[in-house]
Amino acid sequence: KDANGNSFATRLSNIFVIGNGNKPWISLP
């Protein structure tokens, strides 16, 4: 099962989308 990998990818994607959509959640260059 790839639950961990899937969860990680989804979380990263969500954070990226949220940061690039609403506000800068994470400080990336």
Image (cartoon, grey):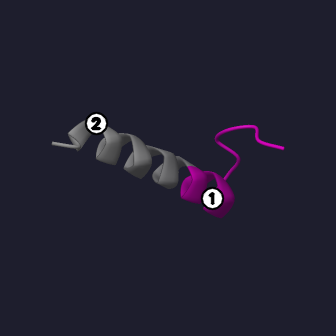
- The residue at 50%/46% (across/down) is 12
Could you say which quadrant of the image residue 4 lies in? Answer: top left
Q: Position of residue 15 (x, y in %)?
A: 53, 47
Q: Of 24 and 9, which appears nearest the observer?
A: 9
Q: For this view, does 4 lie left or right of residue 10?
A: left
* CA gap, disc 1 and disc 2: 26 Å
For the residue labelled by badge 1, is the local secondary structure a helix, a strand or a loop? loop
Q: Of 20 and 9, which appears nearest the observer?
A: 9
Amino acid type, residue under disc 2 in the picture? Asn
Disc 1 versus disc 2: nearer the observer = 2
Number of on-image labels: 2
Residue under numbered circle 2: 4
Q: Of 28 and 24, which appears nearest the observer?
A: 28
User: N-terminal of the two: label 1 or label 2?
Assistant: 2
Q: Which mark is residue 8?
A: none
Q: Which residues are magenta?
A: 16-29
Q: Position of residue 27 (x, y in %)?
A: 75, 37
User: 27 above or below 15?
Assistant: above
Q: Quadrant of the C terminus?
A: top right
Residue furthest out toward the left: 1
Q: Position of residue 13 (x, y in %)?
A: 49, 54
Q: For this view, does 23 lie left or right of residue 13?
A: right
- The residue at 59%/52% (across/down) is 16
Q: Is residue 27 magenta?
A: yes
Q: Which mark is residue 22?
A: 1
- The residue at 67%/52% (across/down) is 23
Q: Residues within 10 Å of mark 2 (few under 14, many from 20)?
A: few
Q: Residues within 10 Å of mark 1 (few under 14, many from 20)?
A: few
Amino acid type, residue under disc 1 in the picture? Asn
